[in-house]
Image: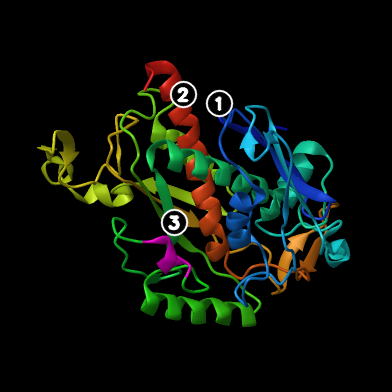
Amino acid sequence: MPNTFGHLFRITTFGESHGGAVGVVLDGCPPRLELAEADIQRDLDRRRPGQSQLTTQRQEEDTVEILSGTFEGRTLGTPIVMLVRNKDARPGDYAEMKDRFRPSHADFTYQSKYGIRNWQGGGRASARETIGRVAGGAVARKLLREACGLEVVAYVKQVQDLMAVIDPGAVEAASVEANAVRCPDAAAAAAMFERIDQARRDGDSLGGVVEAVARNVPVGLGDPVFDKLEADLAKGLMSLPASKGFEIGSGFGGVLLRGSEHNDPMTLEAGRVRSRSNRSGGVQGGISNGEPIVLRVAFKPTATIAKEQDSVDESGRAVKLAAKGRHDPCVLPRAVPVVEAMILLVLADHWLRHRAQCGA
């Protein structure tokens, strides 16, 4: 079962939702990068459960431990192992799911493929697996910030049919973190909060869209055929739990335009080639062009809900199932730091690959 992502900057995540711990082995981080547990903890705190009434009430501090790969506060260039121990696991909450399949979850497909599954919280199919991604992404964030001033900011753009108005070129992390929804449009955030909370009270769930922008991206990341930058971003982001759609730049909306409307006019600005518009989303021909990378990821409503649903058990017998575990009524607020992490992991990998190939 593959659990590794990346080429030069590579992570391998491990652990199950209700096991002893989860974590990541990060290989390929250059030496001499200043790194402390506090650098990792900031992003894990944004991802952890129990932040508000809109998230699962599982109480986990998600405290990270760096077990290897650093010495006297700097990376060694050797594998960095980061561990987060599970403190509030309640496997008994899932006893009803021991031989029953949750609709639209990984239970049936996992059992069919491997002939065995960890039914306690979904095991590796749980969103708790993303702790390792966020920890690895936090290292990538620091590496890229120091190397080229690159920054990534994600935010909730849409919940169900509620759409926020946000300028990707101006949005700041502080405005994203100003409310529990992680939507920097305050009026939209208030409406989203009420909609999600009502779904929670109804024992139901909602989906939506996370948008993200990467700024100060160097020109030249990505390759023009199978390793296009947007292709690797799509792979990373579509590997996230509950993700169902990906678009970059104009995305699907671009089909409504003619080429004369869609093309980004080019100009020379302060000795640098720039685009007057950014419908390409910062990537052309699979290679970054120096403009901000703007992308969106669609997340489905959380599959595990408290409402009674029709299902079958492992023998194929029709059953009713109402989940008793602790689950997010909407994954979007906690998905924001995870989306950022996956973007950072892809960009760090391509930055190292570009530097190795082109010496830049």
Q: Quadrant of the N terminus?
A: top right
Q: Residue 148 placed where, x, y %? A: 38, 37
Q: What number is the disc on residue 7?
A: 1
Question: Along the polypeptide, which appears first: circle 1 or circle 2?
Answer: 1
Query: Is 231 covered by the magenta stretch?
Result: no
Q: Which residue is mark 3?
A: 154
Give the residue type at disc 1: His
Can residue 208 be seen? yes
Residue lying at 56% horizontally and 36% vertically, measured from the top left: 33
Identify the element where label 2 is drawn: helix
Question: Along the polypeptide, which appears first: circle 2 or circle 3?
Answer: 3
Q: Residue 199 placed where, x, y %? A: 58, 78
Identify the element where label 1 is drawn: loop
Q: Residue 184 placed where, x, y %? A: 39, 69
Q: Is residue 350 above or below residue 307?
A: above
Residue lying at 84% horizontally and 51% vertically, measured from the top left: 19
Are dots 2 and 3 in contact, CB under 8 Å? no
Q: What number is the disc on residue 353?
A: 2
**Camera-side residue of 255 and 21:** 21
